[in-house]
Amino acid sequence: SQTIHQWPATLVQPVGSPLSLECTVEGTSNPNLYWYRQAAGRGLQLLFYSVGIGQISSEVPQNLSASRPQDRQFILSSKKLLLSDSGFYLCAWRGGVETGELFFGEGSRLTVL
Amino acid sequence: GQNIDQPTEMTATEGAIVQINCTYQTSGFNGLFWYQQHAGEAPTFLSYNVLDGLEEKGRFSSFLSRSKGYSYLLLKELQMKDSASYLCAVPLSGNTPLVFGKGTRLSVIA
């Protein structure tokens, strides 16, 4: 069966520090992968998606970047965090043979101080 | 473009029925999804509608009217554990990313 994991689960970072969140999927090949962010009191915002190795689409301008170095690995990064980067980050893959629903990782809660 | 609207909050009593509405505007239509998200956790898939009508899954049902750009999630025999946010989502087109509404936070009270 397919599983998706992301880490770390929780982190507290100072403004201006770098960020790296990692997501891996198991049990499937060439998945479509997504990074979403959920800020306090707001909905899920799509940040990046990838349909294959090295292929990244960005949905919103920001100081974040994403990379897909391997088929089942998706990384979210920042060189210098801003206060506004605080939020709940969710990695997802598009599965569901019939419906194509998203399956989410456990989430990473980032607090920038 | 696309726009998804849902009520921000709802409160209902344990054992009752509640209907959570969602209206959407999309340039094309490729199905509508409902997700449940408990506080501090990731969303989990509840239902998918691509044709008009009602899809029933146990205590949860979801309805779609494509001509009206309208869907609702119906929760029956409410339980305290149903207290969560309910997210409506549609894909931009085909096999592209889902766009989510801001979610409806449901509180079930005794």
Image: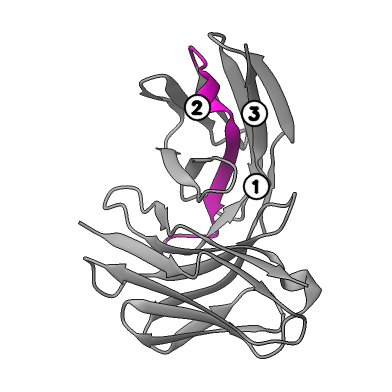
The residue closer to the viewer here, A31 or B38, is B38
The residue closer to the viewer here, A34 or B108, is B108
The lab-note entry on whether marks 3 and 1 share a chain reads yes
Apparent side of residue B5 relative to residue B32 in the rendered image (left or right): right
Please name the residue that numbered disc 2 is placed on: B63
Residue at 67% x, 52% y is: A43
Q: Position of residue B2 (x, y in %)?
A: 66, 55
**Circle 3 Cα neighbour tier, 10 Å, few/some/many (<14 / 14–19 / ≥20):** many
Q: Between marks 3 and 1, how big is the CA–CA gap?
A: 15 Å
Q: What kind of residue is marked 2?
A: Phe
- Give yes or no for residue A22 being in the magenta stretch: no
Judging from the image, what secondary structure is the residue with disc 3 in?
strand
Answer with the quarter of the image where residue A105 lies.
bottom left
Say which of marks 3 and 1 sits in front: 3
Task: Say which label, 3 or 1, has the lower sequence index.
Answer: 1
Which quadrant, please, contains the C terminus of chain A? bottom right
Answer with the quarter of the image where residue B85 lies.
top right
Please name the residue that numbered disc 1 is placed on: B101
Answer with the quarter of the image where residue B39 lies.
top right
Residue B84 visible in the current orientation: yes
Q: Position of residue A37 (x, y in %)?
A: 62, 63
Which quadrant, please, contains the N terminus of chain A? bottom left
Which chain letter matches label 1? B
Which region is colored magenta?
A: B76-94
Q: What kind of residue is marked 1?
A: Gly
**Number of marks present in the image shown:** 3
